[in-house]
Image (tube, helix red, strand yellow):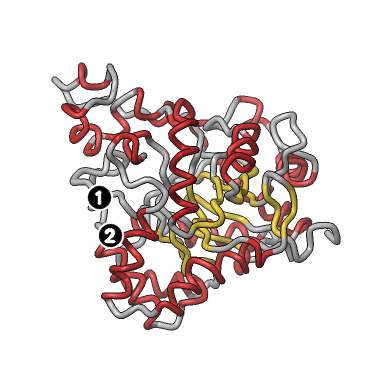
Amino acid sequence: MPSLSGKVQTVLGPVEPDCLGYTLTHEHLTMNYSSCFCPPSPGQEPLSNGPIEMKNLFWIKQNPYSHKENLLLYQETDAVREELLHFKAAGGGTIVENTTTGICRDVNTLKKLAEETGVHIIAGAGFYVDSTHSAQTQAMTVEQLTEIIVDEVLKGADGTNIKCGVVGEIGCSWPLTPSEHRVLQATAQAQSQLGCPVIIHPGRNSDSPFQIIRILQEAGADASKTVMSHLDRTIFDKKKLLEFAKVGCYLEYDLFGTEFLHYQFHPDIDMPNDNERIARIRMLIDEGYEDRILMAHDVHTKNRLMKYGGHGYSHIFKNIVPKMLIRGISQDKIDKILLANPKRWLTFK
């Protein structure tokens, strides 16, 4: 792709990679997560309804997917605009917006936010997890899915001329479904054609990232241009994580700010806290993988916005980076993770 080769594609058009600045590689600015609503525990049903208030904020923080309004991030564009300005003031330059088909991607709003804030915003092509696939999507062949993904990058998404700059987050469940398998094959074919960056949402099982990379590579994908998201909730065993690191993809720790007792999507998983995430990143650096690490917050519910007492999009810059320095991670290594690695990943081949 001569027109995109060596460039990064934002919702306002291609830019030079050196323009990006500090980059968060996995966020959401507008989306509807109602498809992933989790019914609350017996006796707590009334807590699912009504507004977000101080008196229910702790319950929502512990049960974010059981409060209906909390899943409607698309209602908070004004608040997100303000928080992007905080992100920019804290040193941020670029946000990769991972909302794909199935969870209400809105590239028009992303373009407006980019224009109004001066933050580079990169939109995601492709499809989320199987439970959000339409009957039409589930009936498509790999070739048809590939054509859609390629068009979202080259022509524009959702009936607009606003183009996506990454493919993903591509949603995968555990076990992987036939429809998700076809989407992965289409993702690989699109990447092979375009030389584009790809980002994956793995299933909640430590074998899922291995399975996904194998399927992608068999279909022609480039692991070195692919991000495996959510490793902080997926691979806990150090030996297994280092085994996965050898495949050569980017290793993303993207749930910074998420700390709760009970992980609703998988009760057997103990969600790590931010200190544990920093320790895991330090271990990967010590093992020689500093060029493969990425970081983000994956803001996708209202309670994580500063408007509702959350950390917003600036938490990594304001709180995590200082703690990383205290823990012996040098500024040079931090700059690799937040500046150089995202730039390398996002640049079209």
Q: Nearer the viewer, residue 118 or 60?
A: 118
List x then y, in percent, for residue 186: 69, 48
x 39%, y 29%: residue: 71
**The N terminus: image quadrant:** bottom right
x 35%, y 29%: residue: 70
Q: Looking at the rendering, which quadrant does residue 128 occupy? A: top right
* Marks 1/2: CA–CA distance: 7 Å
**Residue highlighted by disc 2:** 274
Q: Does residue 300 lie above or below 315 as drawn?
A: above
Does residue 179 appear in this view? no
x 36%, y 39%: residue: 305
Q: Does residue 315 lie above or below 98 as drawn?
A: below
In the displayed structure image, the side of residue 152 where residue 205 appears, left or right: left
Disc 2 residue type?
Asp
Verify CB contact (< 8 Å) between mark 1 and mark 2: yes
**Residue highlighted by disc 1:** 259
In the displayed structure image, the side of residue 105 where residue 319 appears, left or right: left
Does residue 314 appear in this view? yes
Residue density around tag 2, few if under 14, some if 14–19, many if 20 or more, within 10 Å: many
Q: Earlier in the sequence, mark 1 or mark 2?
A: 1
Asked which secondary structure carries label 1, the reply is loop
**The C terminus: image quadrant:** bottom right
Q: Does residue 285 lie above or below 172 as drawn?
A: below
x 45%, y 61%: residue: 252
